[in-house]
Amino acid sequence: MASEPCSASIVVKDQHASKLRSLCSSCQNCLVKVCQEHVDGSWSLTYNQIKESLGRGSNHQIHDNYDEWSEAMRGGCWICCRLRDYVPRPILEKLANKSIMPAAVTCSATMKMDRCFSLSIKTGQYQMGLTVRRSYPGMSQTVVLEVGNATNSSSAWKTVLTWLDNCIHRHGSCGSLKLSQETAWYPTRLLDLCDSVNENANLKVIDTANEKLEGFYITLSHCWGEGNYMLLTTENKMILQNKIPDLPRTFEEATFVCRKLGIRYLWVDSLCIVQDDPEDWAREAALMQDVYSRAWCNISATASRHSDEGLFRQRKEYVVGQLTIDLKGIGRVSITEEDPFAQIEISPLQNRAWVLQERLLSKRILHFGNTQIFWECGHLSACESFPNGISRDGSDSGMRSIFGMETKKDPVTTWSSIVENYTRRSITYTSDKLPVLSGIVKNLSPVLGGIYLAGVWNNKNLVYDLGWATVVSRSDLRPRPKYRAPTWSWASIDDAVKFMRLPDSLCIPHITVMDACVEPVGSDESIAVRSGYLLVRGHLKRVGIDEQKMFHRFKLHFDACEDTPSELFFLPLYLEHFVRSSQHENNSFTTSNNYSRYLILVADPEHSTWYKRVGLAATEHFTVGRNPKDDLDKWVLVNAGPRIPCERYLGPGEEEGHVIRIV
């Protein structure tokens, strides 16, 4: 939930704020209905009444179509205007010219424990979260902040400089980044502004090894876009080292930010890596950990789809951080955005796979959004409408905390979250699947321990990290790409994945990993691998699949679009024990479930005792203590035992099972 804005930053001016304080009649009517349903309009619920209401939701339609929504925005409705900021600009343009089917604006409400409720305002697939609570005397009323009419206004820069100053001098774990001749490090190339103040100074690409550098550098994260954009190549390298003639708007405005902050050097991937030199690219890709983590700050062109859209945006001069209004029959309520950072998560830039690494490794980030500037560092996530900070959980910003910042997050869970987030993003060249994460891998290595194996870690959680599954339907699966990782790694496929292990569950492994190995292509095993294998011991079953018959007990997640062989093998991976507690009226209930995960394997046609993964199977057992083999036995065609090809078979005893190699 968002915290209240800093009172020192609040400027309330009635002549400017009156329109910003309004809600359209449809939004007001919706809020009245929600309050009547969840708090009886009185806000006097007892603790037990609130508990009974938890999880109970309600749904309402606010606007039937885009025309109604658009009219409400023109009238200044705060909720309708805020929702617009969550919809990408291209979608808004298509809605306006009616080139796509308009969606209704809807609202769903859920009661929360602290006598307030959450609203999810949605149109199509885009939504924002609001928190509504009763407004008591003495509480902050409508908060209107003066932010200037553009994201490069003097008010905006005052806020930015405050964030930077506090971070540098008060955030110990973010680091002051003090430089000395002994500790100074610079990327191979930088853009030299030649003068950190004079806008007319020449801009050029420099090789840092040949220069005597002083001061810090800043990095830029941006969408390259389609078409012709400026790149450093072997052909133009000499020209750009003398002078860069013209810059795209995003690069030009990034140099403006550097000069505004007194920083002389800027690193931009497209101009600091020789794009048509594979050796240079590979060498620089291995340095990404240092490039971003050692930078003074990262500038993020968050709202821009390509390098000609720039950083800065025009906007209204005032922004409402909190809205307080009178609802007929309900009284005075306050409405606050739950997470303005959601605007960043749906931005064009955050769809890029490379940007995840850039975001997680950077010590400080300035996001230039459509309506305001956002700030991220190890101690603070903030924006102009909430300059004192926003409490966030489960976001990219939260994942950044594993790199030496204060956190209660489990690093292992965080790795799963990183992979799930990463695989949802777009990547231009699928061969970059492993290089994109190399910097994060190097930062995580001391935290996670074990050896990194092309997407998974050989540590105590290896068995559970093998339990990933694709999230798209089987008909939408992409073909298995050219080899880049063993089949047991999520990096071997092109679709988004999720990890099946549930939080707070007790897991019992069904396999033992006896050996694990990958062969890197070069000296850096995080960049590319030539081959790899797992040597495991477990109870392999040869099965025939009748998907109609198995539907009620098994869920099959295949990895890629490929023909399913007639002969499959199931290898029980782990059993998960999960306990749920619930209460109904005066009775408490505890339900125990067992969830089993199985690797779906096929025999390697070239090696009789080797297997390849083609998917994951999952089933749920409602009876505590039930043996997961009971379900599997119903589809066994040939019983487990030495007749199944394996490296060796261990007979009855503690170590009974097949020893097989998965590649």
Image (cartoon, rainbow, N blue to C red):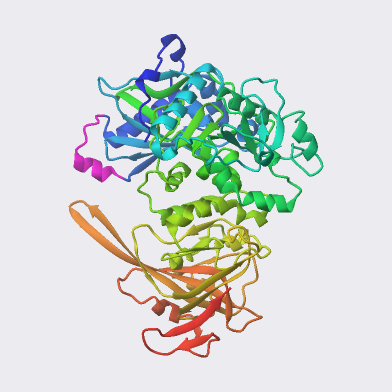
User: Which corner quadrant of the image does residue 519 belong to?
Assistant: bottom right
Q: Residue furthest right?
A: 235
Q: Is residue 109 above or below residue 647?
A: above
Numbered label tally = 0
The residue lying toward the viewer, choosing from 235 and 351, is 235
User: Which corner quadrant of the image does residue 37 belong to?
Assistant: top left
What residue sits 57% from the left and 59% below the top?
473
User: Which corner quadrant of the image does residue 224 belong to?
Assistant: top right
In magenta, the rendered stretch is: 42-54
Where is residue 290? Give x, y as percent. 56, 46
Where is residue 304? Give x, y as percent. 62, 33
Q: Dividing the image into 4 quarters, which one contains the N terminus?
A: top left
What residue sits 65% from the left and 48% below the top?
284
- Magenta-drawn stretch contains 19: no
Q: Is residue 87 left or right of residue 384?
A: right
What residue sits 34% from the left and 62% below the top?
505
- Magenta-drawn stretch contains 50: yes
Q: Residue furthest front?
A: 182
Where is residue 44? Give x, y as percent. 21, 32
Q: Is residue 189 above or below residue 143?
A: below
What residue sits 33% from the left and 58% below the top?
504
